[in-house]
Image (cartoon, rainbow, N blue to C red):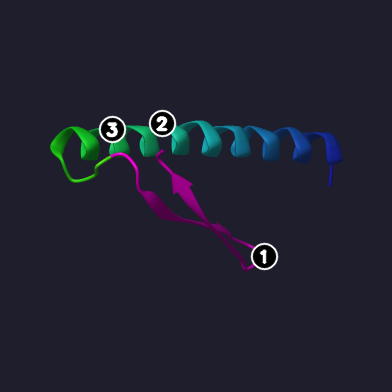
Amino acid sequence: MNEDVFNTSLRGFLKKVGITSQREIEKAVREAVADGRLKGNEKLPAKMVLTLGGVSLSHEVTAEIELG
């Protein structure tokens, strides 16, 4: 295994996940506030599930996203 290639590829994947996830969350929350489904002061439960084929990895991260 080439550690440099692996590290670069992994970092690229994580950057893509972070950027696209943030955009989707912001969009969904703003639409819900605009539609009146959220007031804007809630704490929303969040869960991210990471899976990686070939090694049977499944990792779950949970947290709350506070709106204000």
Point 83% across, 34% down: residue: 4
Where, by quadrant of the figure, is residue 23 drawn?
top left
Q: For this view, does 36 lie left or right of residue 57?
A: left
39 falls in the magenta region: no
Q: State the SS at label 3.
A: helix
58 falls in the magenta region: yes
Give the percent coordinates (x, y) of residue 22. Answer: 46, 35
Q: Are marks 3 and 2 in contact (CB under 8 Å)?
A: no
Binning the other alpha carbons within 10 Å of mark 3 as few (below 14), some (14 to 19) or many (20 upward) gives some
Q: State the SS at label 1.
A: loop
Mark 3: which amino acid?
A: Arg
Pair 1/2: label in front: 2
Q: Which residue is mark 3?
A: 30
Q: Which residues are magenta?
A: 40-68
State whether residue 58 is above or below residue 21.
below
Q: Residue furthest left?
A: 35
Sequence-wise first label, 1 or 2: 2
Mark 2: which amino acid?
A: Arg
Give the percent coordinates (x, y) of residue 60. Answer: 56, 62
Give the percent coordinates (x, y) of residue 36. Answer: 15, 40
Where, by quadrant of the figure, is residue 52 drawn?
bottom right
Sequence-wise first label, 3 or 2: 2
Viewer-proximal residue among 43 and 63:
43
Q: Which residue is mark 1?
A: 55
Binning the other alpha carbons within 10 Å of mark 1 as few (below 14), some (14 to 19) or many (20 upward) gives few
Point 64% across, 32% down: residue: 12
Mark 1: which amino acid?
A: Val
| Res 23 label | 2
Quarter of the image with the C terminus is: top left
Point 63% across, 62% down: residue: 54
